[in-house]
Image (spheres, rainbow, N blue to C red):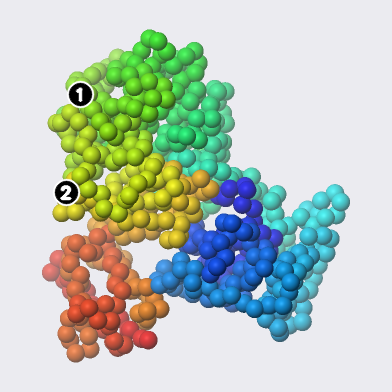
Amino acid sequence: MVEKADIPLKNGLHLRPGFAVIAFEHRVVIFDLKKRTAVITFTQMASFNAIQEKIVGIVLHKDTLFVANSQKVFKRFIDFPNLASDLRLADPSTWDELKHQSPKVGSIFYDHKKGIQVSEYKAFTYSLSNGKFDQVITDEKVGVWVNGDSLKFKDFWDEDEVFLPQWMGVNPLDSCRWILSSDQIWQHCKGKTTLWKDPNEFPAGVVTTVSVRPGIEFVAWMHPYQVKIPVNGDFIAYDFRYGSHYFDDSKGQDANQPLKTMVINDAGFVFTGTWGGSVFSRSPDDYFYRNFHKANGDCMDSWSGDYSIVRGVNKTLNENTMFFSYWGETGENNYGIAWLDDEHNLYCGNDIGSSMVSGPILSIKNSKGNYDVFSVYEHGIGAWDGDMDFMTLAPTRSKELKVVKRQKVYTGALGYARDISWDTKNGRLWLAGISHLGYYEPGTDSVIIPLSIRGIESAEYTALEVDRHGDLWVGTRSHGVFHIKLQNNMADSLLATNITSKDGLLSNTVLDLAIDGALGRVIFAHDIGVSVYHTFAVRFDEGYLEENSKPIKVYPNPFRPGKHQYVTIDNINSTGAFNLFNSAGKVVKTFSSAEMVGGGVKWDGIMANGELAPPGVYHYVVRHNNKAHRGRLLIIR
């Protein structure tokens, strides 16, 4: 998912076992093919800033990556088997500049006898193996060779016999060739060339919303397309409006105020709230299911005629039902709230809000079987100022929503909240305004702004999620993401860690985010695509070190402190204790349960005494439920 302005380079695709390296004009991205996620995005290589100056060529020879601009060539060793623990992967100073004699760089290629070669022309790039062309890509009519044989596959050329493909790469796992263009993708394998995919199934653009079905899949919304990306299998893109005749005006509304109105529920149904078309829904097999709209006889209010505006979509936290908030009828009603039960029966409460203009909504089923609902609203259209209603709602037999209790909550300096999220661990609601974060304690009447947030000077907030450990994940317009921890479990004292493109994010513009606790990952929606960030911090930690659970995994092993950033001990339990012993039987490192959040821990090689662990054989013991689990770690230099 790439912005169209940043086009791929010809011959810009290179494959290694489990990984793909793809070059665009302004960045180079390494993808993990198994996880289907980006590992790192390179935009700064030594003195070369690819954002400001275009990349003109890329070559991956063995594990050395060469990248060129119009004047210089840079290289870096890429340790593909140990990318996750490369200490300085994002450090621009780890790139070396190569000397060359060409007055300018038009293209680069690798000659197996002479090494990396520089040409001032863009005529062609090629690889040479055993005196034969392994692959050739040109801008004109020369074509593609595979092991010396010319491929004159008719779809490779246009009407003027100009060669069309832009990328070509070899998959080391099966020696198949992948040939890609802006129009189609082919696979050449065992002498047969077949059409694989149409890139129209992989649309590009601004991703405004992401929603996750933990452990199974997530969905990204790039209007009008929604892309469903499962953990296993090919991802699917579809126009969410297809199958309905109702007008959708969401594209024109999301530039200044990104919509967070798409949610996938536990059964795999995707619900999308829109400007004009109310709610569109699609089934788990990606077919159009239903359009919830007043013109269809549904009970939801319409803002004006057939133009219905839904600004809040939420799956109830502790069950598989949905809530929608929608604008009231112009000049007549305040906003309304609808509830969709698990059999897709719709219940409505029209004109129950404190303003006509609704916003984000969040719902929790309470102990009495009713629903506690937090509903944000603006004081007027485009006001950017607002407050929040806290209501308890009860569905009735007549398919209405009865207001059991209502309380107006003042947001104060925070103003209109762009996003809200419930802290299950501590039982409070967090809100993100344009320039403030705040929290609401049930039973009070006002949102509180934390007294101290260390690590954030200023930022425009765009998105908010709270993980199961009570940590905040906050997206921003231009400062990447902040991972925020409560100091001493106090909501008034926060400590933020910044995650940016230097850490591998696709962009520092983050419009939305979603947490997948089952797989320990956070999905970020950007202005140019999606990033997936893997971390123990958000992962569920139950089920480890139990009968039939996954065995403890230690990697890389052997571990090289200084070269590897850390060694990972995975599939352990946060309720246990971890001790590492040297060959003399002395404990050199201990991790408490608080440090093993998410069922894993990372160690940088620094022992308890503050010194770097010397080479040798170490033994670890993990204790859980009165059982000891043992293993070995080798440290080398």
The disc at residue 407 is 1
Q: Position of residue 1 (x, y in %)?
A: 55, 49
Picture quadrant of residue 311: top left
Q: Give the tally of numbered discs.
A: 2
Q: Is residue 524 left or right of residue 226?
A: left
**Residue flagged by tag 2: what amino acid is it?**
Met
Residue located farthest toward the top when viewing the structure as drawn:
332
Does the image show residue 389? yes
Question: Which residue is at 25% across, 18% downward?
Answer: 402
Question: Which residue is at 50% across, 43% downward?
Answer: 207
The residue carrying pointer 1 sits among few (fewer than 14), some (14 to 19) or many (20 or more) residues within 10 Å by Cα, namely some
Q: Is residue 177 left or right of residue 29?
A: right
Q: Is residue 42 left or right of residue 367?
A: right
The residue carrying pointer 2 sits among few (fewer than 14), some (14 to 19) or many (20 or more) residues within 10 Å by Cα, namely few
Q: Please name whichever residue, 156 or 454, is drawn nearer the observer in this view of the structure.
A: 454
Q: Position of residue 453 (x, y in %)?
A: 25, 49
The nearer-to-camera label among 1 and 2 is 2
Compared to residue 194, the image places residue 175 above or below, namely below
- In the rendered image, which residue does mark 2 sit on? 490
Does the image show residue 523? no
**Residue flagged by tag 1: what amino acid is it?**
Gln
* Secondary element at image label 2: strand
Marked residue nearer the N-terminal end (1 or 2): 1
Compared to residue 556, the image places residue 223 above or below, namely above
* Secondary element at image label 1: strand
Question: Which residue is at 34% across, 27% downward?
Answer: 385
Q: Please name whichever residue, 509 or 145, is drawn nearer the observer in this view of the structure.
A: 509
Q: Position of residue 479 (x, y in %)?
A: 41, 50
- On-image quarter of the C terminus: bottom left
Question: Which residue is at 17% across, 86% downward?
Answer: 585
Spatial CA span between label 1 and label 2:
25 Å
Q: Position of residue 548 (x, y in %)?
A: 28, 64
